[in-house]
Amino acid sequence: MTRFLSKDLLSGLMFIAFGMAALYFGQKLALGTPVRMGPGYVPRMLSFILLSLGGIIVLATLFRTADKAEKERYWIPVAGLTVAVFAFSLIPWGQSFIADSVLGPANQQAFKTMTIPFMVSALLVIDVIILMILVSLFGRPGADADDPVEAPKWKPITMVTIGIVLFALLFERAGLLPSLVVLVLISSLGGEEFKLTEVIGNMVVLAILCTLVFKVGLGMNIYIVRGIW
């Protein structure tokens, strides 16, 4: 259906995909507790935030294109069920039941540590899946997207991607400053206008900020210019 081909909806799905990927690759990191955070605590929270934001964006987009009949037929029951499941997860017995039956006994403590962010993100993603299926099968046919997707602009996509790849390759070999210069220069070539003074200004500002924040402020063990500092 054309309502699925909107910028907001595809952006929301992208957030969900990134959140799922982050959860998958970080699943073996120790979680810890809010007081004694393990290496997996912050990545897990960021994953839940990405999933929640993606779910909200997709649901808001679908809601804008839904008519009154769809809202009464699909949205009200799904919303009611979501609220009921969330309330159930806040009860101690409900927490144990969900942790044991859905996640398994090994994840019970981790679930209790992050019950609310986990349930919010999980329920939003489940709502997205359910509503997209219902709308595609039984929804109003011919509903148009409120912000249709335009044809991709390959020049900026290509140049920014090349700039990021070169930054990653040069960071360890040459240092932060050379890699930033290459990133800004290559990415700027993807724009409609290329003004050398603005590009140099961006390089200087980024170099100063990154040096002050990462090298001086946080004391990270990185090279600004390899072999010099």
Image (cartoon, grey):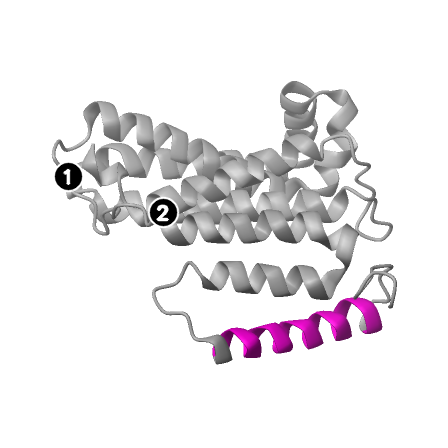
Q: Which amino acid does label 2 sit on?
A: Trp
Q: Is 204 one of the magenta-colored residues?
A: yes
Magenta stretch: dominant SS?
helix
Q: Which residue is drawn at 47% across and 64% down?
A: 188
- In the rendered view, would you say 160 is above or below 201? above
Categorize mark 2 by other alpha carbons within 10 Å: few (<14), some (14-19), many (20+). Answer: few
Q: What residue type is labelled 1?
A: Ala
What numbered label is drawn on residue 154?
2
Q: What element carries label 1?
A: loop
Residue located beneath label 1 in the image: 143
Residue 137 visible in rendering? yes
Q: What stretch is highlighted in magenta?
A: 198-216
Query: Quarter holding the C terminus?
Result: bottom right
Query: Quarter holding the N terminus?
Result: top left
- In the rendered view, would you say 33 is above or below 95? below
Name the one closer to the observer, 148 or 33.
148
Sequence-first disc among 2 and 1: 1
